[in-house]
Amino acid sequence: MPDAMERYLFDLNGYLVLRNAIDPEHLRALNEGIDALLPLEIGEWSGYVHGHNYGDDDGFNLQQIYEGGEPFERLIDHPAWIQHVKHFVGGEGTFDWHHGPLFIDENFATLRGPGEAIGLHSGGHLAVKRNQYRYYNGFFRCGQINILLALTNIGPGDGSTMVIPGSHKANLEHPEAERRQMRGEEASVDGVTGAIEVHLAAGDALLFVDAIMHGSARRSSAGIRRTIVYRYGPSWGNFRHGYQPSPELLARLTPKRRQIVQPQQLIPRAPQKQT
């Protein structure tokens, strides 16, 4: 559960940094799990993990990364962030906690090399229901809370995630947004007025509401920046893309994890004989 200062800073800025969110052994297992899925091209499958990108020089994504094995499954309800996520998505006491309030609508690992970046996107001015920020009657009601987990050190020159603090509550569009947005003329957040780099050590996690304006700096360092993103929202949401969890994954998950991955169970109905 976030403490009073975390609640204040999240409301003020739209994000929190969770230091040392996972331990070194878990970090090693995640990187080894990604290595085992590679090489993979865009559009190809490795088991139930799909090669993907967003159509720009934004790197390479391994979609449905929670299908990659137990180390990735452990992230679904990781204790370093799951209570924070529940609190900011719904507000404690506003859901039936036995059934669980959460749903992961997208989960992926990103590999980003030299010259790659993702442009500026989101912002409170858009008022998008899916990713909106709300605080009402003493409770947070956020449409989407993202956990971005660093699997490598991400400092100056490493293509850091960049955010514009407070922009989750902005009423006006950023004057530089059109040129710097995804698939824009200059799709990165380098030099955008008001934006800051969020530097992370491997094993740290960035928690942020998706309504905050965010993107990344362009990587100038050698090597590959590795991150994992799990996007959490209310249990009545749907998948962002057309992916579905595999029967094998659902069969081996704990009940709590399965509830987050597939919160709604289909109700079978056999056709009735007409009389």
Image: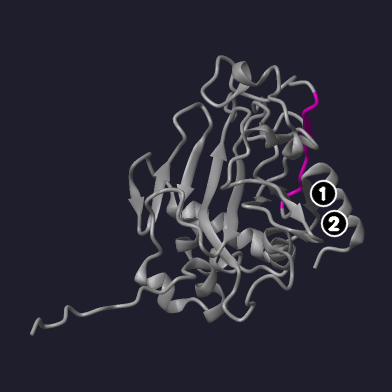
Residue underneath mark 2: 7
Mark 1 burial class by Cα count in 10 Å: few <14, some 14-19, many 20+: many
**Which quarter of the picture shows residue 193?**
top right
- Estimate the x, y position of residue 77 in percent, counting from the top left: 63, 69
- Estimate the x, y position of residue 246 in percent, counting from the top left: 37, 66
What stretch of residues is rendered in magenta? 194-202
- Quadrant that contains the N terminus: bottom right
Name which residue type carries label 2.
Arg
Q: Secondary structure at mark 1?
A: helix
**Which quarter of the picture shows residue 52?**
top left
Figure check: 58 above or below 267: above
Q: Residue furthest front?
A: 275
Q: Residue at x 29, y 78 (%)?
A: 268
Disc 1 + disc 2, Cβ < 8 Å? yes
Confirm whether residue 155 shows in the render: no
Q: Residue at x 57, y 32 (%)?
A: 113
Name which residue type carries label 1.
Asp
Residue underneath mark 1: 11
- Estimate the x, y position of residue 218 in percent, counting from the top left: 64, 26
Q: Judge whether residue 176 is colored magenta.
A: no
Q: Alpha-carbon distance for marks 1 and 2? A: 6 Å
Q: Residue at x 68, y 63 (%)?
A: 90
Most common secondary structure along the magenta stretch? loop
Figure check: 97 above or below 109: below
